[in-house]
Image: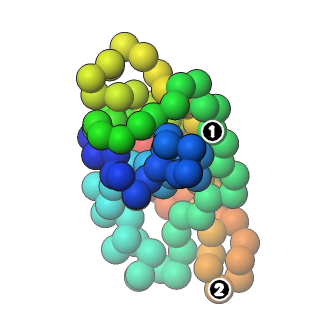
């Protein structure tokens, strides 16, 4: 997924603030979940994805203006979770990774606040 680096993404030091990298990662993850029609699954069952941890390694600074390309990779699904991994690159230097990170998605029952097995329909989309 490509996204613009917005002027407002920068901090007082003139580079993209570290928290914004997590927003880039979030947007790619949400777009992926939407492409799987997971939102319709949530509303009908009261179950859906939550992030239980997220990490980021900052390799290079990003500065406005420019565009970023964010690549997401999905691991093999477990009983109730799946690991995702991300690489962020500037569009004008596609061979240079500027940050890499990950997030663990766990399927939960929202009311009970407990993990539940990944629905078979969702699992099938990830394999």
Q: CA distance from mark 2 to mark 1?
A: 30 Å
Q: Which residue is mark 2?
A: 111
State whether residue 97 is above or below residue 13: above
- Residue 95 is situated, as x and y percent measured from the top left of the image, at 37, 13
Q: Nearer the viewer, residue 31 or 106?
A: 31
Upstream in the sequence, badge 2 or badge 1? 1
- Residue projecting furthest to the bottom: 111
Q: Left or right: where does residue 77 sit relative to residue 97?
A: right
Residue found farthest to the top: 95
Question: Which SS class for mark 1?
Answer: strand
Classed neighbour count for the residue bearing mark 2: other residues with Cα under 10 Å, few (<14), some (14–19), many (≥20): few
The reply to whether residue 73 is visible in this rendering is no
- 44 versus 80 height, above or below: below
Colouring used for the render: rainbow
Residue at 32% in and 19% down: 94
- In the rendered image, the quadrant that contains the N terminus is top left
Q: Residue at x 54, y 74 (%)?
A: 47
Q: Is label 2 or label 1 in front?
A: 1
Residue 37, given in percent of the width and then of the height, sits at 31, 63
Does residue 11 appear in this view? yes
- Residue drawn at x 71%, y 77% is 113
Disc 2 element: loop
> Is residue 48 left or right of 40 when viewed as pictured?
right
95 sits left or right of 112 in the view: left
Where is residue 75 shown, x and y percent of the image? 54, 34
Q: 88 or 78, which lies in front?
A: 88
Foreground pick, 19 / 47: 19
- Reading the image, the residue beneath label 1 is 56
Question: Cβ–Cβ below 8 Å for labels 2 and 1?
Answer: no
Q: Decide: few, some or many residues near mark 1? Use Cα within 10 Å; few <14, some 14-19, many ≥20.
A: some
């Amino acid at each position: 997924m490509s996204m613009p680096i917005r002027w407002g993404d920068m901090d007082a030091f003139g580079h993209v603030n570290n928290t914004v990298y997590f927003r880039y990662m979030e947007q790619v993850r949400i777009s992926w979940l939407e492409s799987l029609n997971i939102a319709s699954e949530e509303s009908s069952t009261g179950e859906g994805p939550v992030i239980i941890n997220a990490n980021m390694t900052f390799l290079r600074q990003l500065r406005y203006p420019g565009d970023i390309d964010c690549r997401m990779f999905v691991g093999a699904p477990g009983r109730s979770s799946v690991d995702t991994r991300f690489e962020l690159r500037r569009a004008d230097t596609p061979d240079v990774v500027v940050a890499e990170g990950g997030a663990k998605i766990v399927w939960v029952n929202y009311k009970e606040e407990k993990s539940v097995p990944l629905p078979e329909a969702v699992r099938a989309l990830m394999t």
